[in-house]
Amino acid sequence: MARRSIHLLALAGLVGATGLCGAAGCHEPEKWSYTGPRVYLIRGADGEPSTGLFEVRDRLRAQEINAEIYSPDNWLKIVVDIDSKPDEEVILVGHGHGAFLATQVVRHYAQQHKMKHIDAVFTLDAYNKDWPHNARERGEEDPHEPPMDTPVGHNALKVRNYVQRNPDSAKWGSEMASTRASNIREEHPYYWYDDYWDRRPVMGQKLKTDVTPMGVRHETIDNPDRMVQRITHLCRKAALSPYHYTPPEHHVDVAKRPASSGYQTNRMVPAR
């Protein structure tokens, strides 16, 4: 009787978990159109229009490169998708708060028990809206101040961080700090994140490209066509390595090759 009760409790727990999963919405891996690298684009939060990322996605798809848009609320779907096929190349692109969340994906895979290299990270005005920045960092008081540096894991092989210091913009993006190619990463693969959350200066190589001369602002940094072209080019260059080739039969729009029926192997036929 006791064993039966245990089995019933276990079954009830399974059903309950399934119900919660259905109610909350379980993350499922993406169904990609092509083989090869995947570009994950994370748009900004409300008030950070990221329409340029949609254009980047469309241009990459037109070149037969996997690309998908994610909102800040469902960025963990990226982790689920990477875990489903960890051997595929990963390229992360983020704007505003989405750029900060891209660094969190990198952080997830910087852990010792789940070490994975991220092929490229391209960020546009990374900004952590959930951290209580002071009024100057929020752009509510003058003079403006840039947010503290955002750490990015040493497992990111290539990082390009585009920031602006336009005085007309209410927010400024943060610089990146990377421990790649330094002795800091030998002590602990992601210990420097403690400095970030404790508001201590983050150690590491500073990464930034100032795009203020292009006339962009935080709210529109990915909208000018020049930035869209640059990000698209970087993604395509990172995705299409000399060793990457997608056979035509793997494309969803190409009909499958019919199986041949008249082919015979060369073999010895016994004499009668």
Image (cartoon, rainbow, N blue to C red):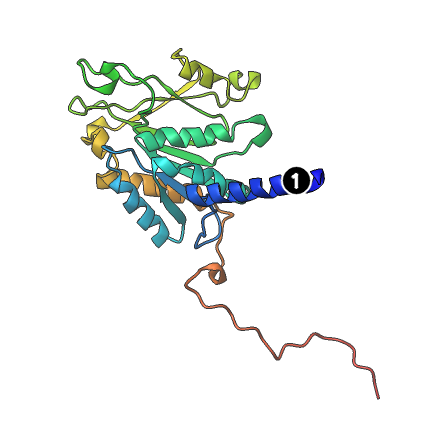
Q: Position of residue 65 (x, y in %)?
A: 40, 50
Q: Amino acid at mark 1?
A: Ser
| Name of the residue lying farthest toward the front | 1
Residue 85 is at least partly visible in this image: no
Q: Residue at x 41, y 12 (%)?
A: 198
Q: Name the foreground residue: 162 vs 102.
A: 102
Specify whether 48 is left or right of 63. Answer: left
> Which residue: 26% across, 17% down?
137
Q: Is residue 38 above or below residue 130?
A: below
Check disc 1: other Cα within 10 Å, few if <14, some if 14-19, many if 20+. Answer: few
Relative to 64, is 17 above or below?
above
Residue shown at the point (59%, 29%) measured from the top left: 113
Residue wearing tag 1: 5
Residue 180 position within the rendered picture, expressed as x and y whole percent measured from the top left: 49, 23
Q: Is residue 162 above or below residue 230?
A: above
Quadrant location of the C terminus in the rendered image: bottom right
The image quadrant of residue 269 is bottom right
